[in-house]
Amino acid sequence: MNRKTLYIVLGAALLMVAACQPEGSQSDESASERPPFSAAYLDEQGVIPPRDVENPYGEPRDIESRIESTRENAITRAVEIGSAAVVSIMATEPIRRPDNPRDEFFRFFFGEQMPRENTNMGSGFIISEDGLVVTNQHVVGSDPSEISISLGDGSTFDAELVGVDELTDIALIRIRSDQTFPFLNFTDSDSVIVGEWSIALGNPFGLFDDGQPTVTVGVISAKNRDFRANPNNPRVYIDMIQTDAAINRGNSGGPLLNSNGEVIGMNTFIYTGGTSAGFVGLSFAIPSNRIEKIISQLLTSGVVMLDYDPGMEFTSMTEQLIYRYRLPYVQGLLVTSVNKNGPAFECGILPGDVIVKIGDERVMSEMHAWALLRDYDVGDDMRVELIREGELFETEMQLRQKVKQNTADSSRQ
């Protein structure tokens, strides 16, 4: 190719490049049409700076303001809602010792001894503007002599016990003050979704005196978890919410929130698999529906009672009873007496029957049975499965309010 031909080819190539160049590409008005990775948008270090999402080709936003605006999320908003209503609790309870003949001896020589006291620390949360606080019964005990409440702003108040229910491990206390308080709202624990966020608030180990709660976050791992009832333990935990949010000593009584900042449960205990390793990812909370049902009765009467009478008395099955009366070797309840005017007699239950199921739940002990009975109300139909003379029977008890017995009926029992 000679020089003249080469010039012609190069000239044609330049004309083609010029034809492909859009008109006014050097104008400021067309800056928004530039591709995002154009060299015109590189900073002095040759790095593409962050852009406004709504205007990706405009002036870069301030990096710190962008980070600040994206740090807030559903969890931080829920924590902001819940923190002001979470309290730290310190309860003092006298230690009751059985009478001992030696006590008289020591009093004679050393005088009257000061009563010994036990101090418990835990968490709680306010549920009304007038200062009602929910916590675990094992945090305040059965008859505390003194209860102190610390809020997140550092203020401290005395509190009084409204009522406790040892069976479900729930206590209700009231702050002694005329001021109004921030409070949390309950939500339906039956609507909890496995896998949704769970946020635990509390004061672990009582470490922090500033009153600010510690936050741990996880997900709902499972619902309706029951634990084998221990005949020697007065507390029964059924329908518990399982979460992997860390709960430690001192977190007991604190709220478990959803991402809306609503109470779905009360943090109560962790499961360690029989080890002393502490938290291993298995935390459990009493569901909010159960809490609301219990505290409504505590507010009304100070105690929790069935609003119906099953019309029978029963006791836990023991090896002594099994061998003495030649009963089937099973866990359950031995029916000891039946009211002839009650629902139990009407559905065919007799003394000597062994109840093995209430509803769909296997009955493990007398305490467990009372916990199961609390899930029913007047007007409900309760399915009962029992063993009589070695055969399995099923019946349905229609629950109603207690009917007083007359003298004749009482004498025939």
Image (spheres, helix red, strand yellow):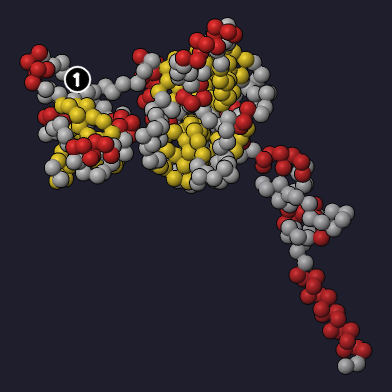
Location of mark 1 (residue): 402
**Where residue 305 sits in the image (x, y, percent)?**
31, 21
Q: Quadrant of the C terminus?
A: top left
Q: Residue at x 77, y 47 (%)?
A: 60
**Where residue 49 sits in the image (x, y, percent)?**
78, 51
Answer above or below: position of 9 versus 288.
below
Q: Is residue 180 left or right of residue 98?
A: right
**Where residue 326 sits in the image (x, y, percent)?**
18, 41
**Where residue 146 sits in the image (x, y, percent)?**
54, 13
Q: Does the rendering let one see residue 22?
A: yes
Quadrant of the rendered structure where residue 209 is?
Answer: top right
**Residue type beneath disc 1:** Lys
Give whichever of 155, 57 is nearer the camera. 155
Q: Quadrant of the N terminus?
A: bottom right
Q: Residue at x 20, y 41 (%)?
A: 327
Q: Residue furthest bottom?
A: 1
Q: Residue at x 35, y 14 (%)?
A: 301
Give whichever of 367, 183 is nearer the camera. 367
Give whichever of 406, 252 is nearer the camera. 406
Q: Is residue 136 left or right of residue 397?
A: right
